Image (tube, grey):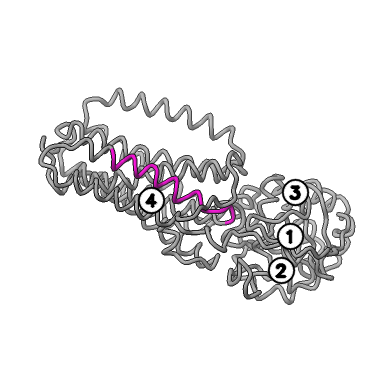
Amino acid sequence: MSANMVALAYLVASVFFILALKGLSSPESARRGNLFGMVGMAIAVATTLTLTQNWLLILGCIAVGGIIGAIVAQRVQMTAMPELVAFMHSLVGLAAVFIAVAAVNNPVSFGLPEILPGGSKLELFLGTFIGAMTWSGSVIAFLKLSGRMSGTPIVFSGQHMLNLLLAIIMIGFGLWFFFSETTNWTAFIAMTAIAFILGFLIIIPIGGADMPVVISMLNSYSGWAAAGIGFSLGNPMLIIAGSLVGSSGAILSYIMCKAMNRPFLSVILGGFGSDGGSAAAADDGVQKTYRSGSAEDAAFLMGNADSVIIVPGYGLAVARAQHAVKELAEILHEKGVNVRFAIHPVAGRMPGHMNVLLAEAEIPYEQVLEMDEINSDFSNTDVVLVLGANDVVNPAANVPGSPIYGMPILDAHKARTVMVVKRSMAVGYAGLDNDLFYMDKTMMIFGDAKKVVEHMVKAL
């Protein structure tokens, strides 16, 4: 294939990637967006295969990876999607490191001069350290999200100074690699090793409550790593695709930070969640009382209401209760009740987690409203049903001095009646007790979300 044809094919693939992002911006067009993305990737892969003589080896590796991916996809539950996404980000970062190592080892095979020019060294340096930090940071995120590692922040004295010192040393080795007349493996390996360590140190102080933003941030890092390697290899497809992923991930991180009232810069620098945002509140020793009820009591209240707002949280995902919730909403709708779903941007463990679950149950999109769209309606709502959500409905966010003060929340506490379905009175990811649970208007219903909702359906 001629150079012009390759450029044209990559351009077409890039257009499909842009259309994919556009489609993924709305639940109604998400499937079309995914289709565009698959078509674009198929064009990009097919075009790349025409540039090499080792296409049989590449196809074999693709087949192996595809088989592994298909097996994993069938076994992974929807509740495990956040850690799966984190694991995939780690592979993207590691791939960028491997490509950079190969390019430094044998630049001629990548179409580069045998003695790497300064520009290529700079690009390889950027792609390598971003990729290394993405890999190690994503591994920590995977371990925290999957429960293999505690979700509480790991902090120690002088942590930020250590990170700063390591970053300076890493840049120093990068400059040594950059200014060396020949390939300086000592500098390159030292730089890469420090980047791996820095990735671990940046993510360990981040608590479980902040993981949705971490995932979008690591998504951005993986994109920039790919773009950096794309410049080194002179591959416009890698540059464009990596830039799209990097920029969209950064924008999503910014949106998530606003949703949690966190400074965006501290996320990028790795200080996110280490002070205040995920700190547990002190126990004041005061015994609080709450009111509990049954699924039948809840069914009676909802069946006689004019309006009901359902707030899904991670408890709904754990119980896989989305299909039972759909049945509940349909029965209430048949009774003339106005039923809607309120989605907080960081509900669950990854951006859009609740939207994906509700879409899987085929709940109509027009019933699913974002926080900004529905928050003003809570004060005029008869019943709010909270399913496994905690921090995103915690009124403590309105109390000065609270660790989550200023975080935008769903104003469930303003409704006439609130019903909360939880397994226990345990605190959420932020480690804070929830004053909503102790209000006179609130009724706690303890149990597995799916079983509780099924009992509600039966009672209705």
Q: Is residue 437 left or right of residue 162?
A: right
Nearer to me, 187 or 252: 187
Going from N to C along the chain, the mark reached first, 3 or 1, is 3
Going from N to C along the chain, the mark reached first, 1 or 2, is 1
Tag 2 secondary structure? helix
Residue located 49% across and 59% down the image: 272
Closer mark to the observer between disc 4 and disc 3? 4
Residue 121 coordinates in the image, percent (x, y): 18, 45
Residue 382 coordinates in the image, percent (x, y): 79, 71
From which residue to which does the magenta span run?
Answer: 190-209
At label 3, the amino acid type is Ala
Residue most toward the front?
157
Going from N to C along the chain, the mark reached first, 4 or 2, is 4
The crowding category of the residue bearing disc 1, from other C-alpha atoms within 10 Å (few below 14, some 14 to 19, many at least 20), is many
Closer mark to the observer between disc 4 and disc 2? 4
Residue 256 coordinates in the image, percent (x, y): 51, 62
Tag 4 secondary structure? helix
What residue is pinned by disc 3? Answer: 324
What residue is pinned by disc 4? Answer: 221
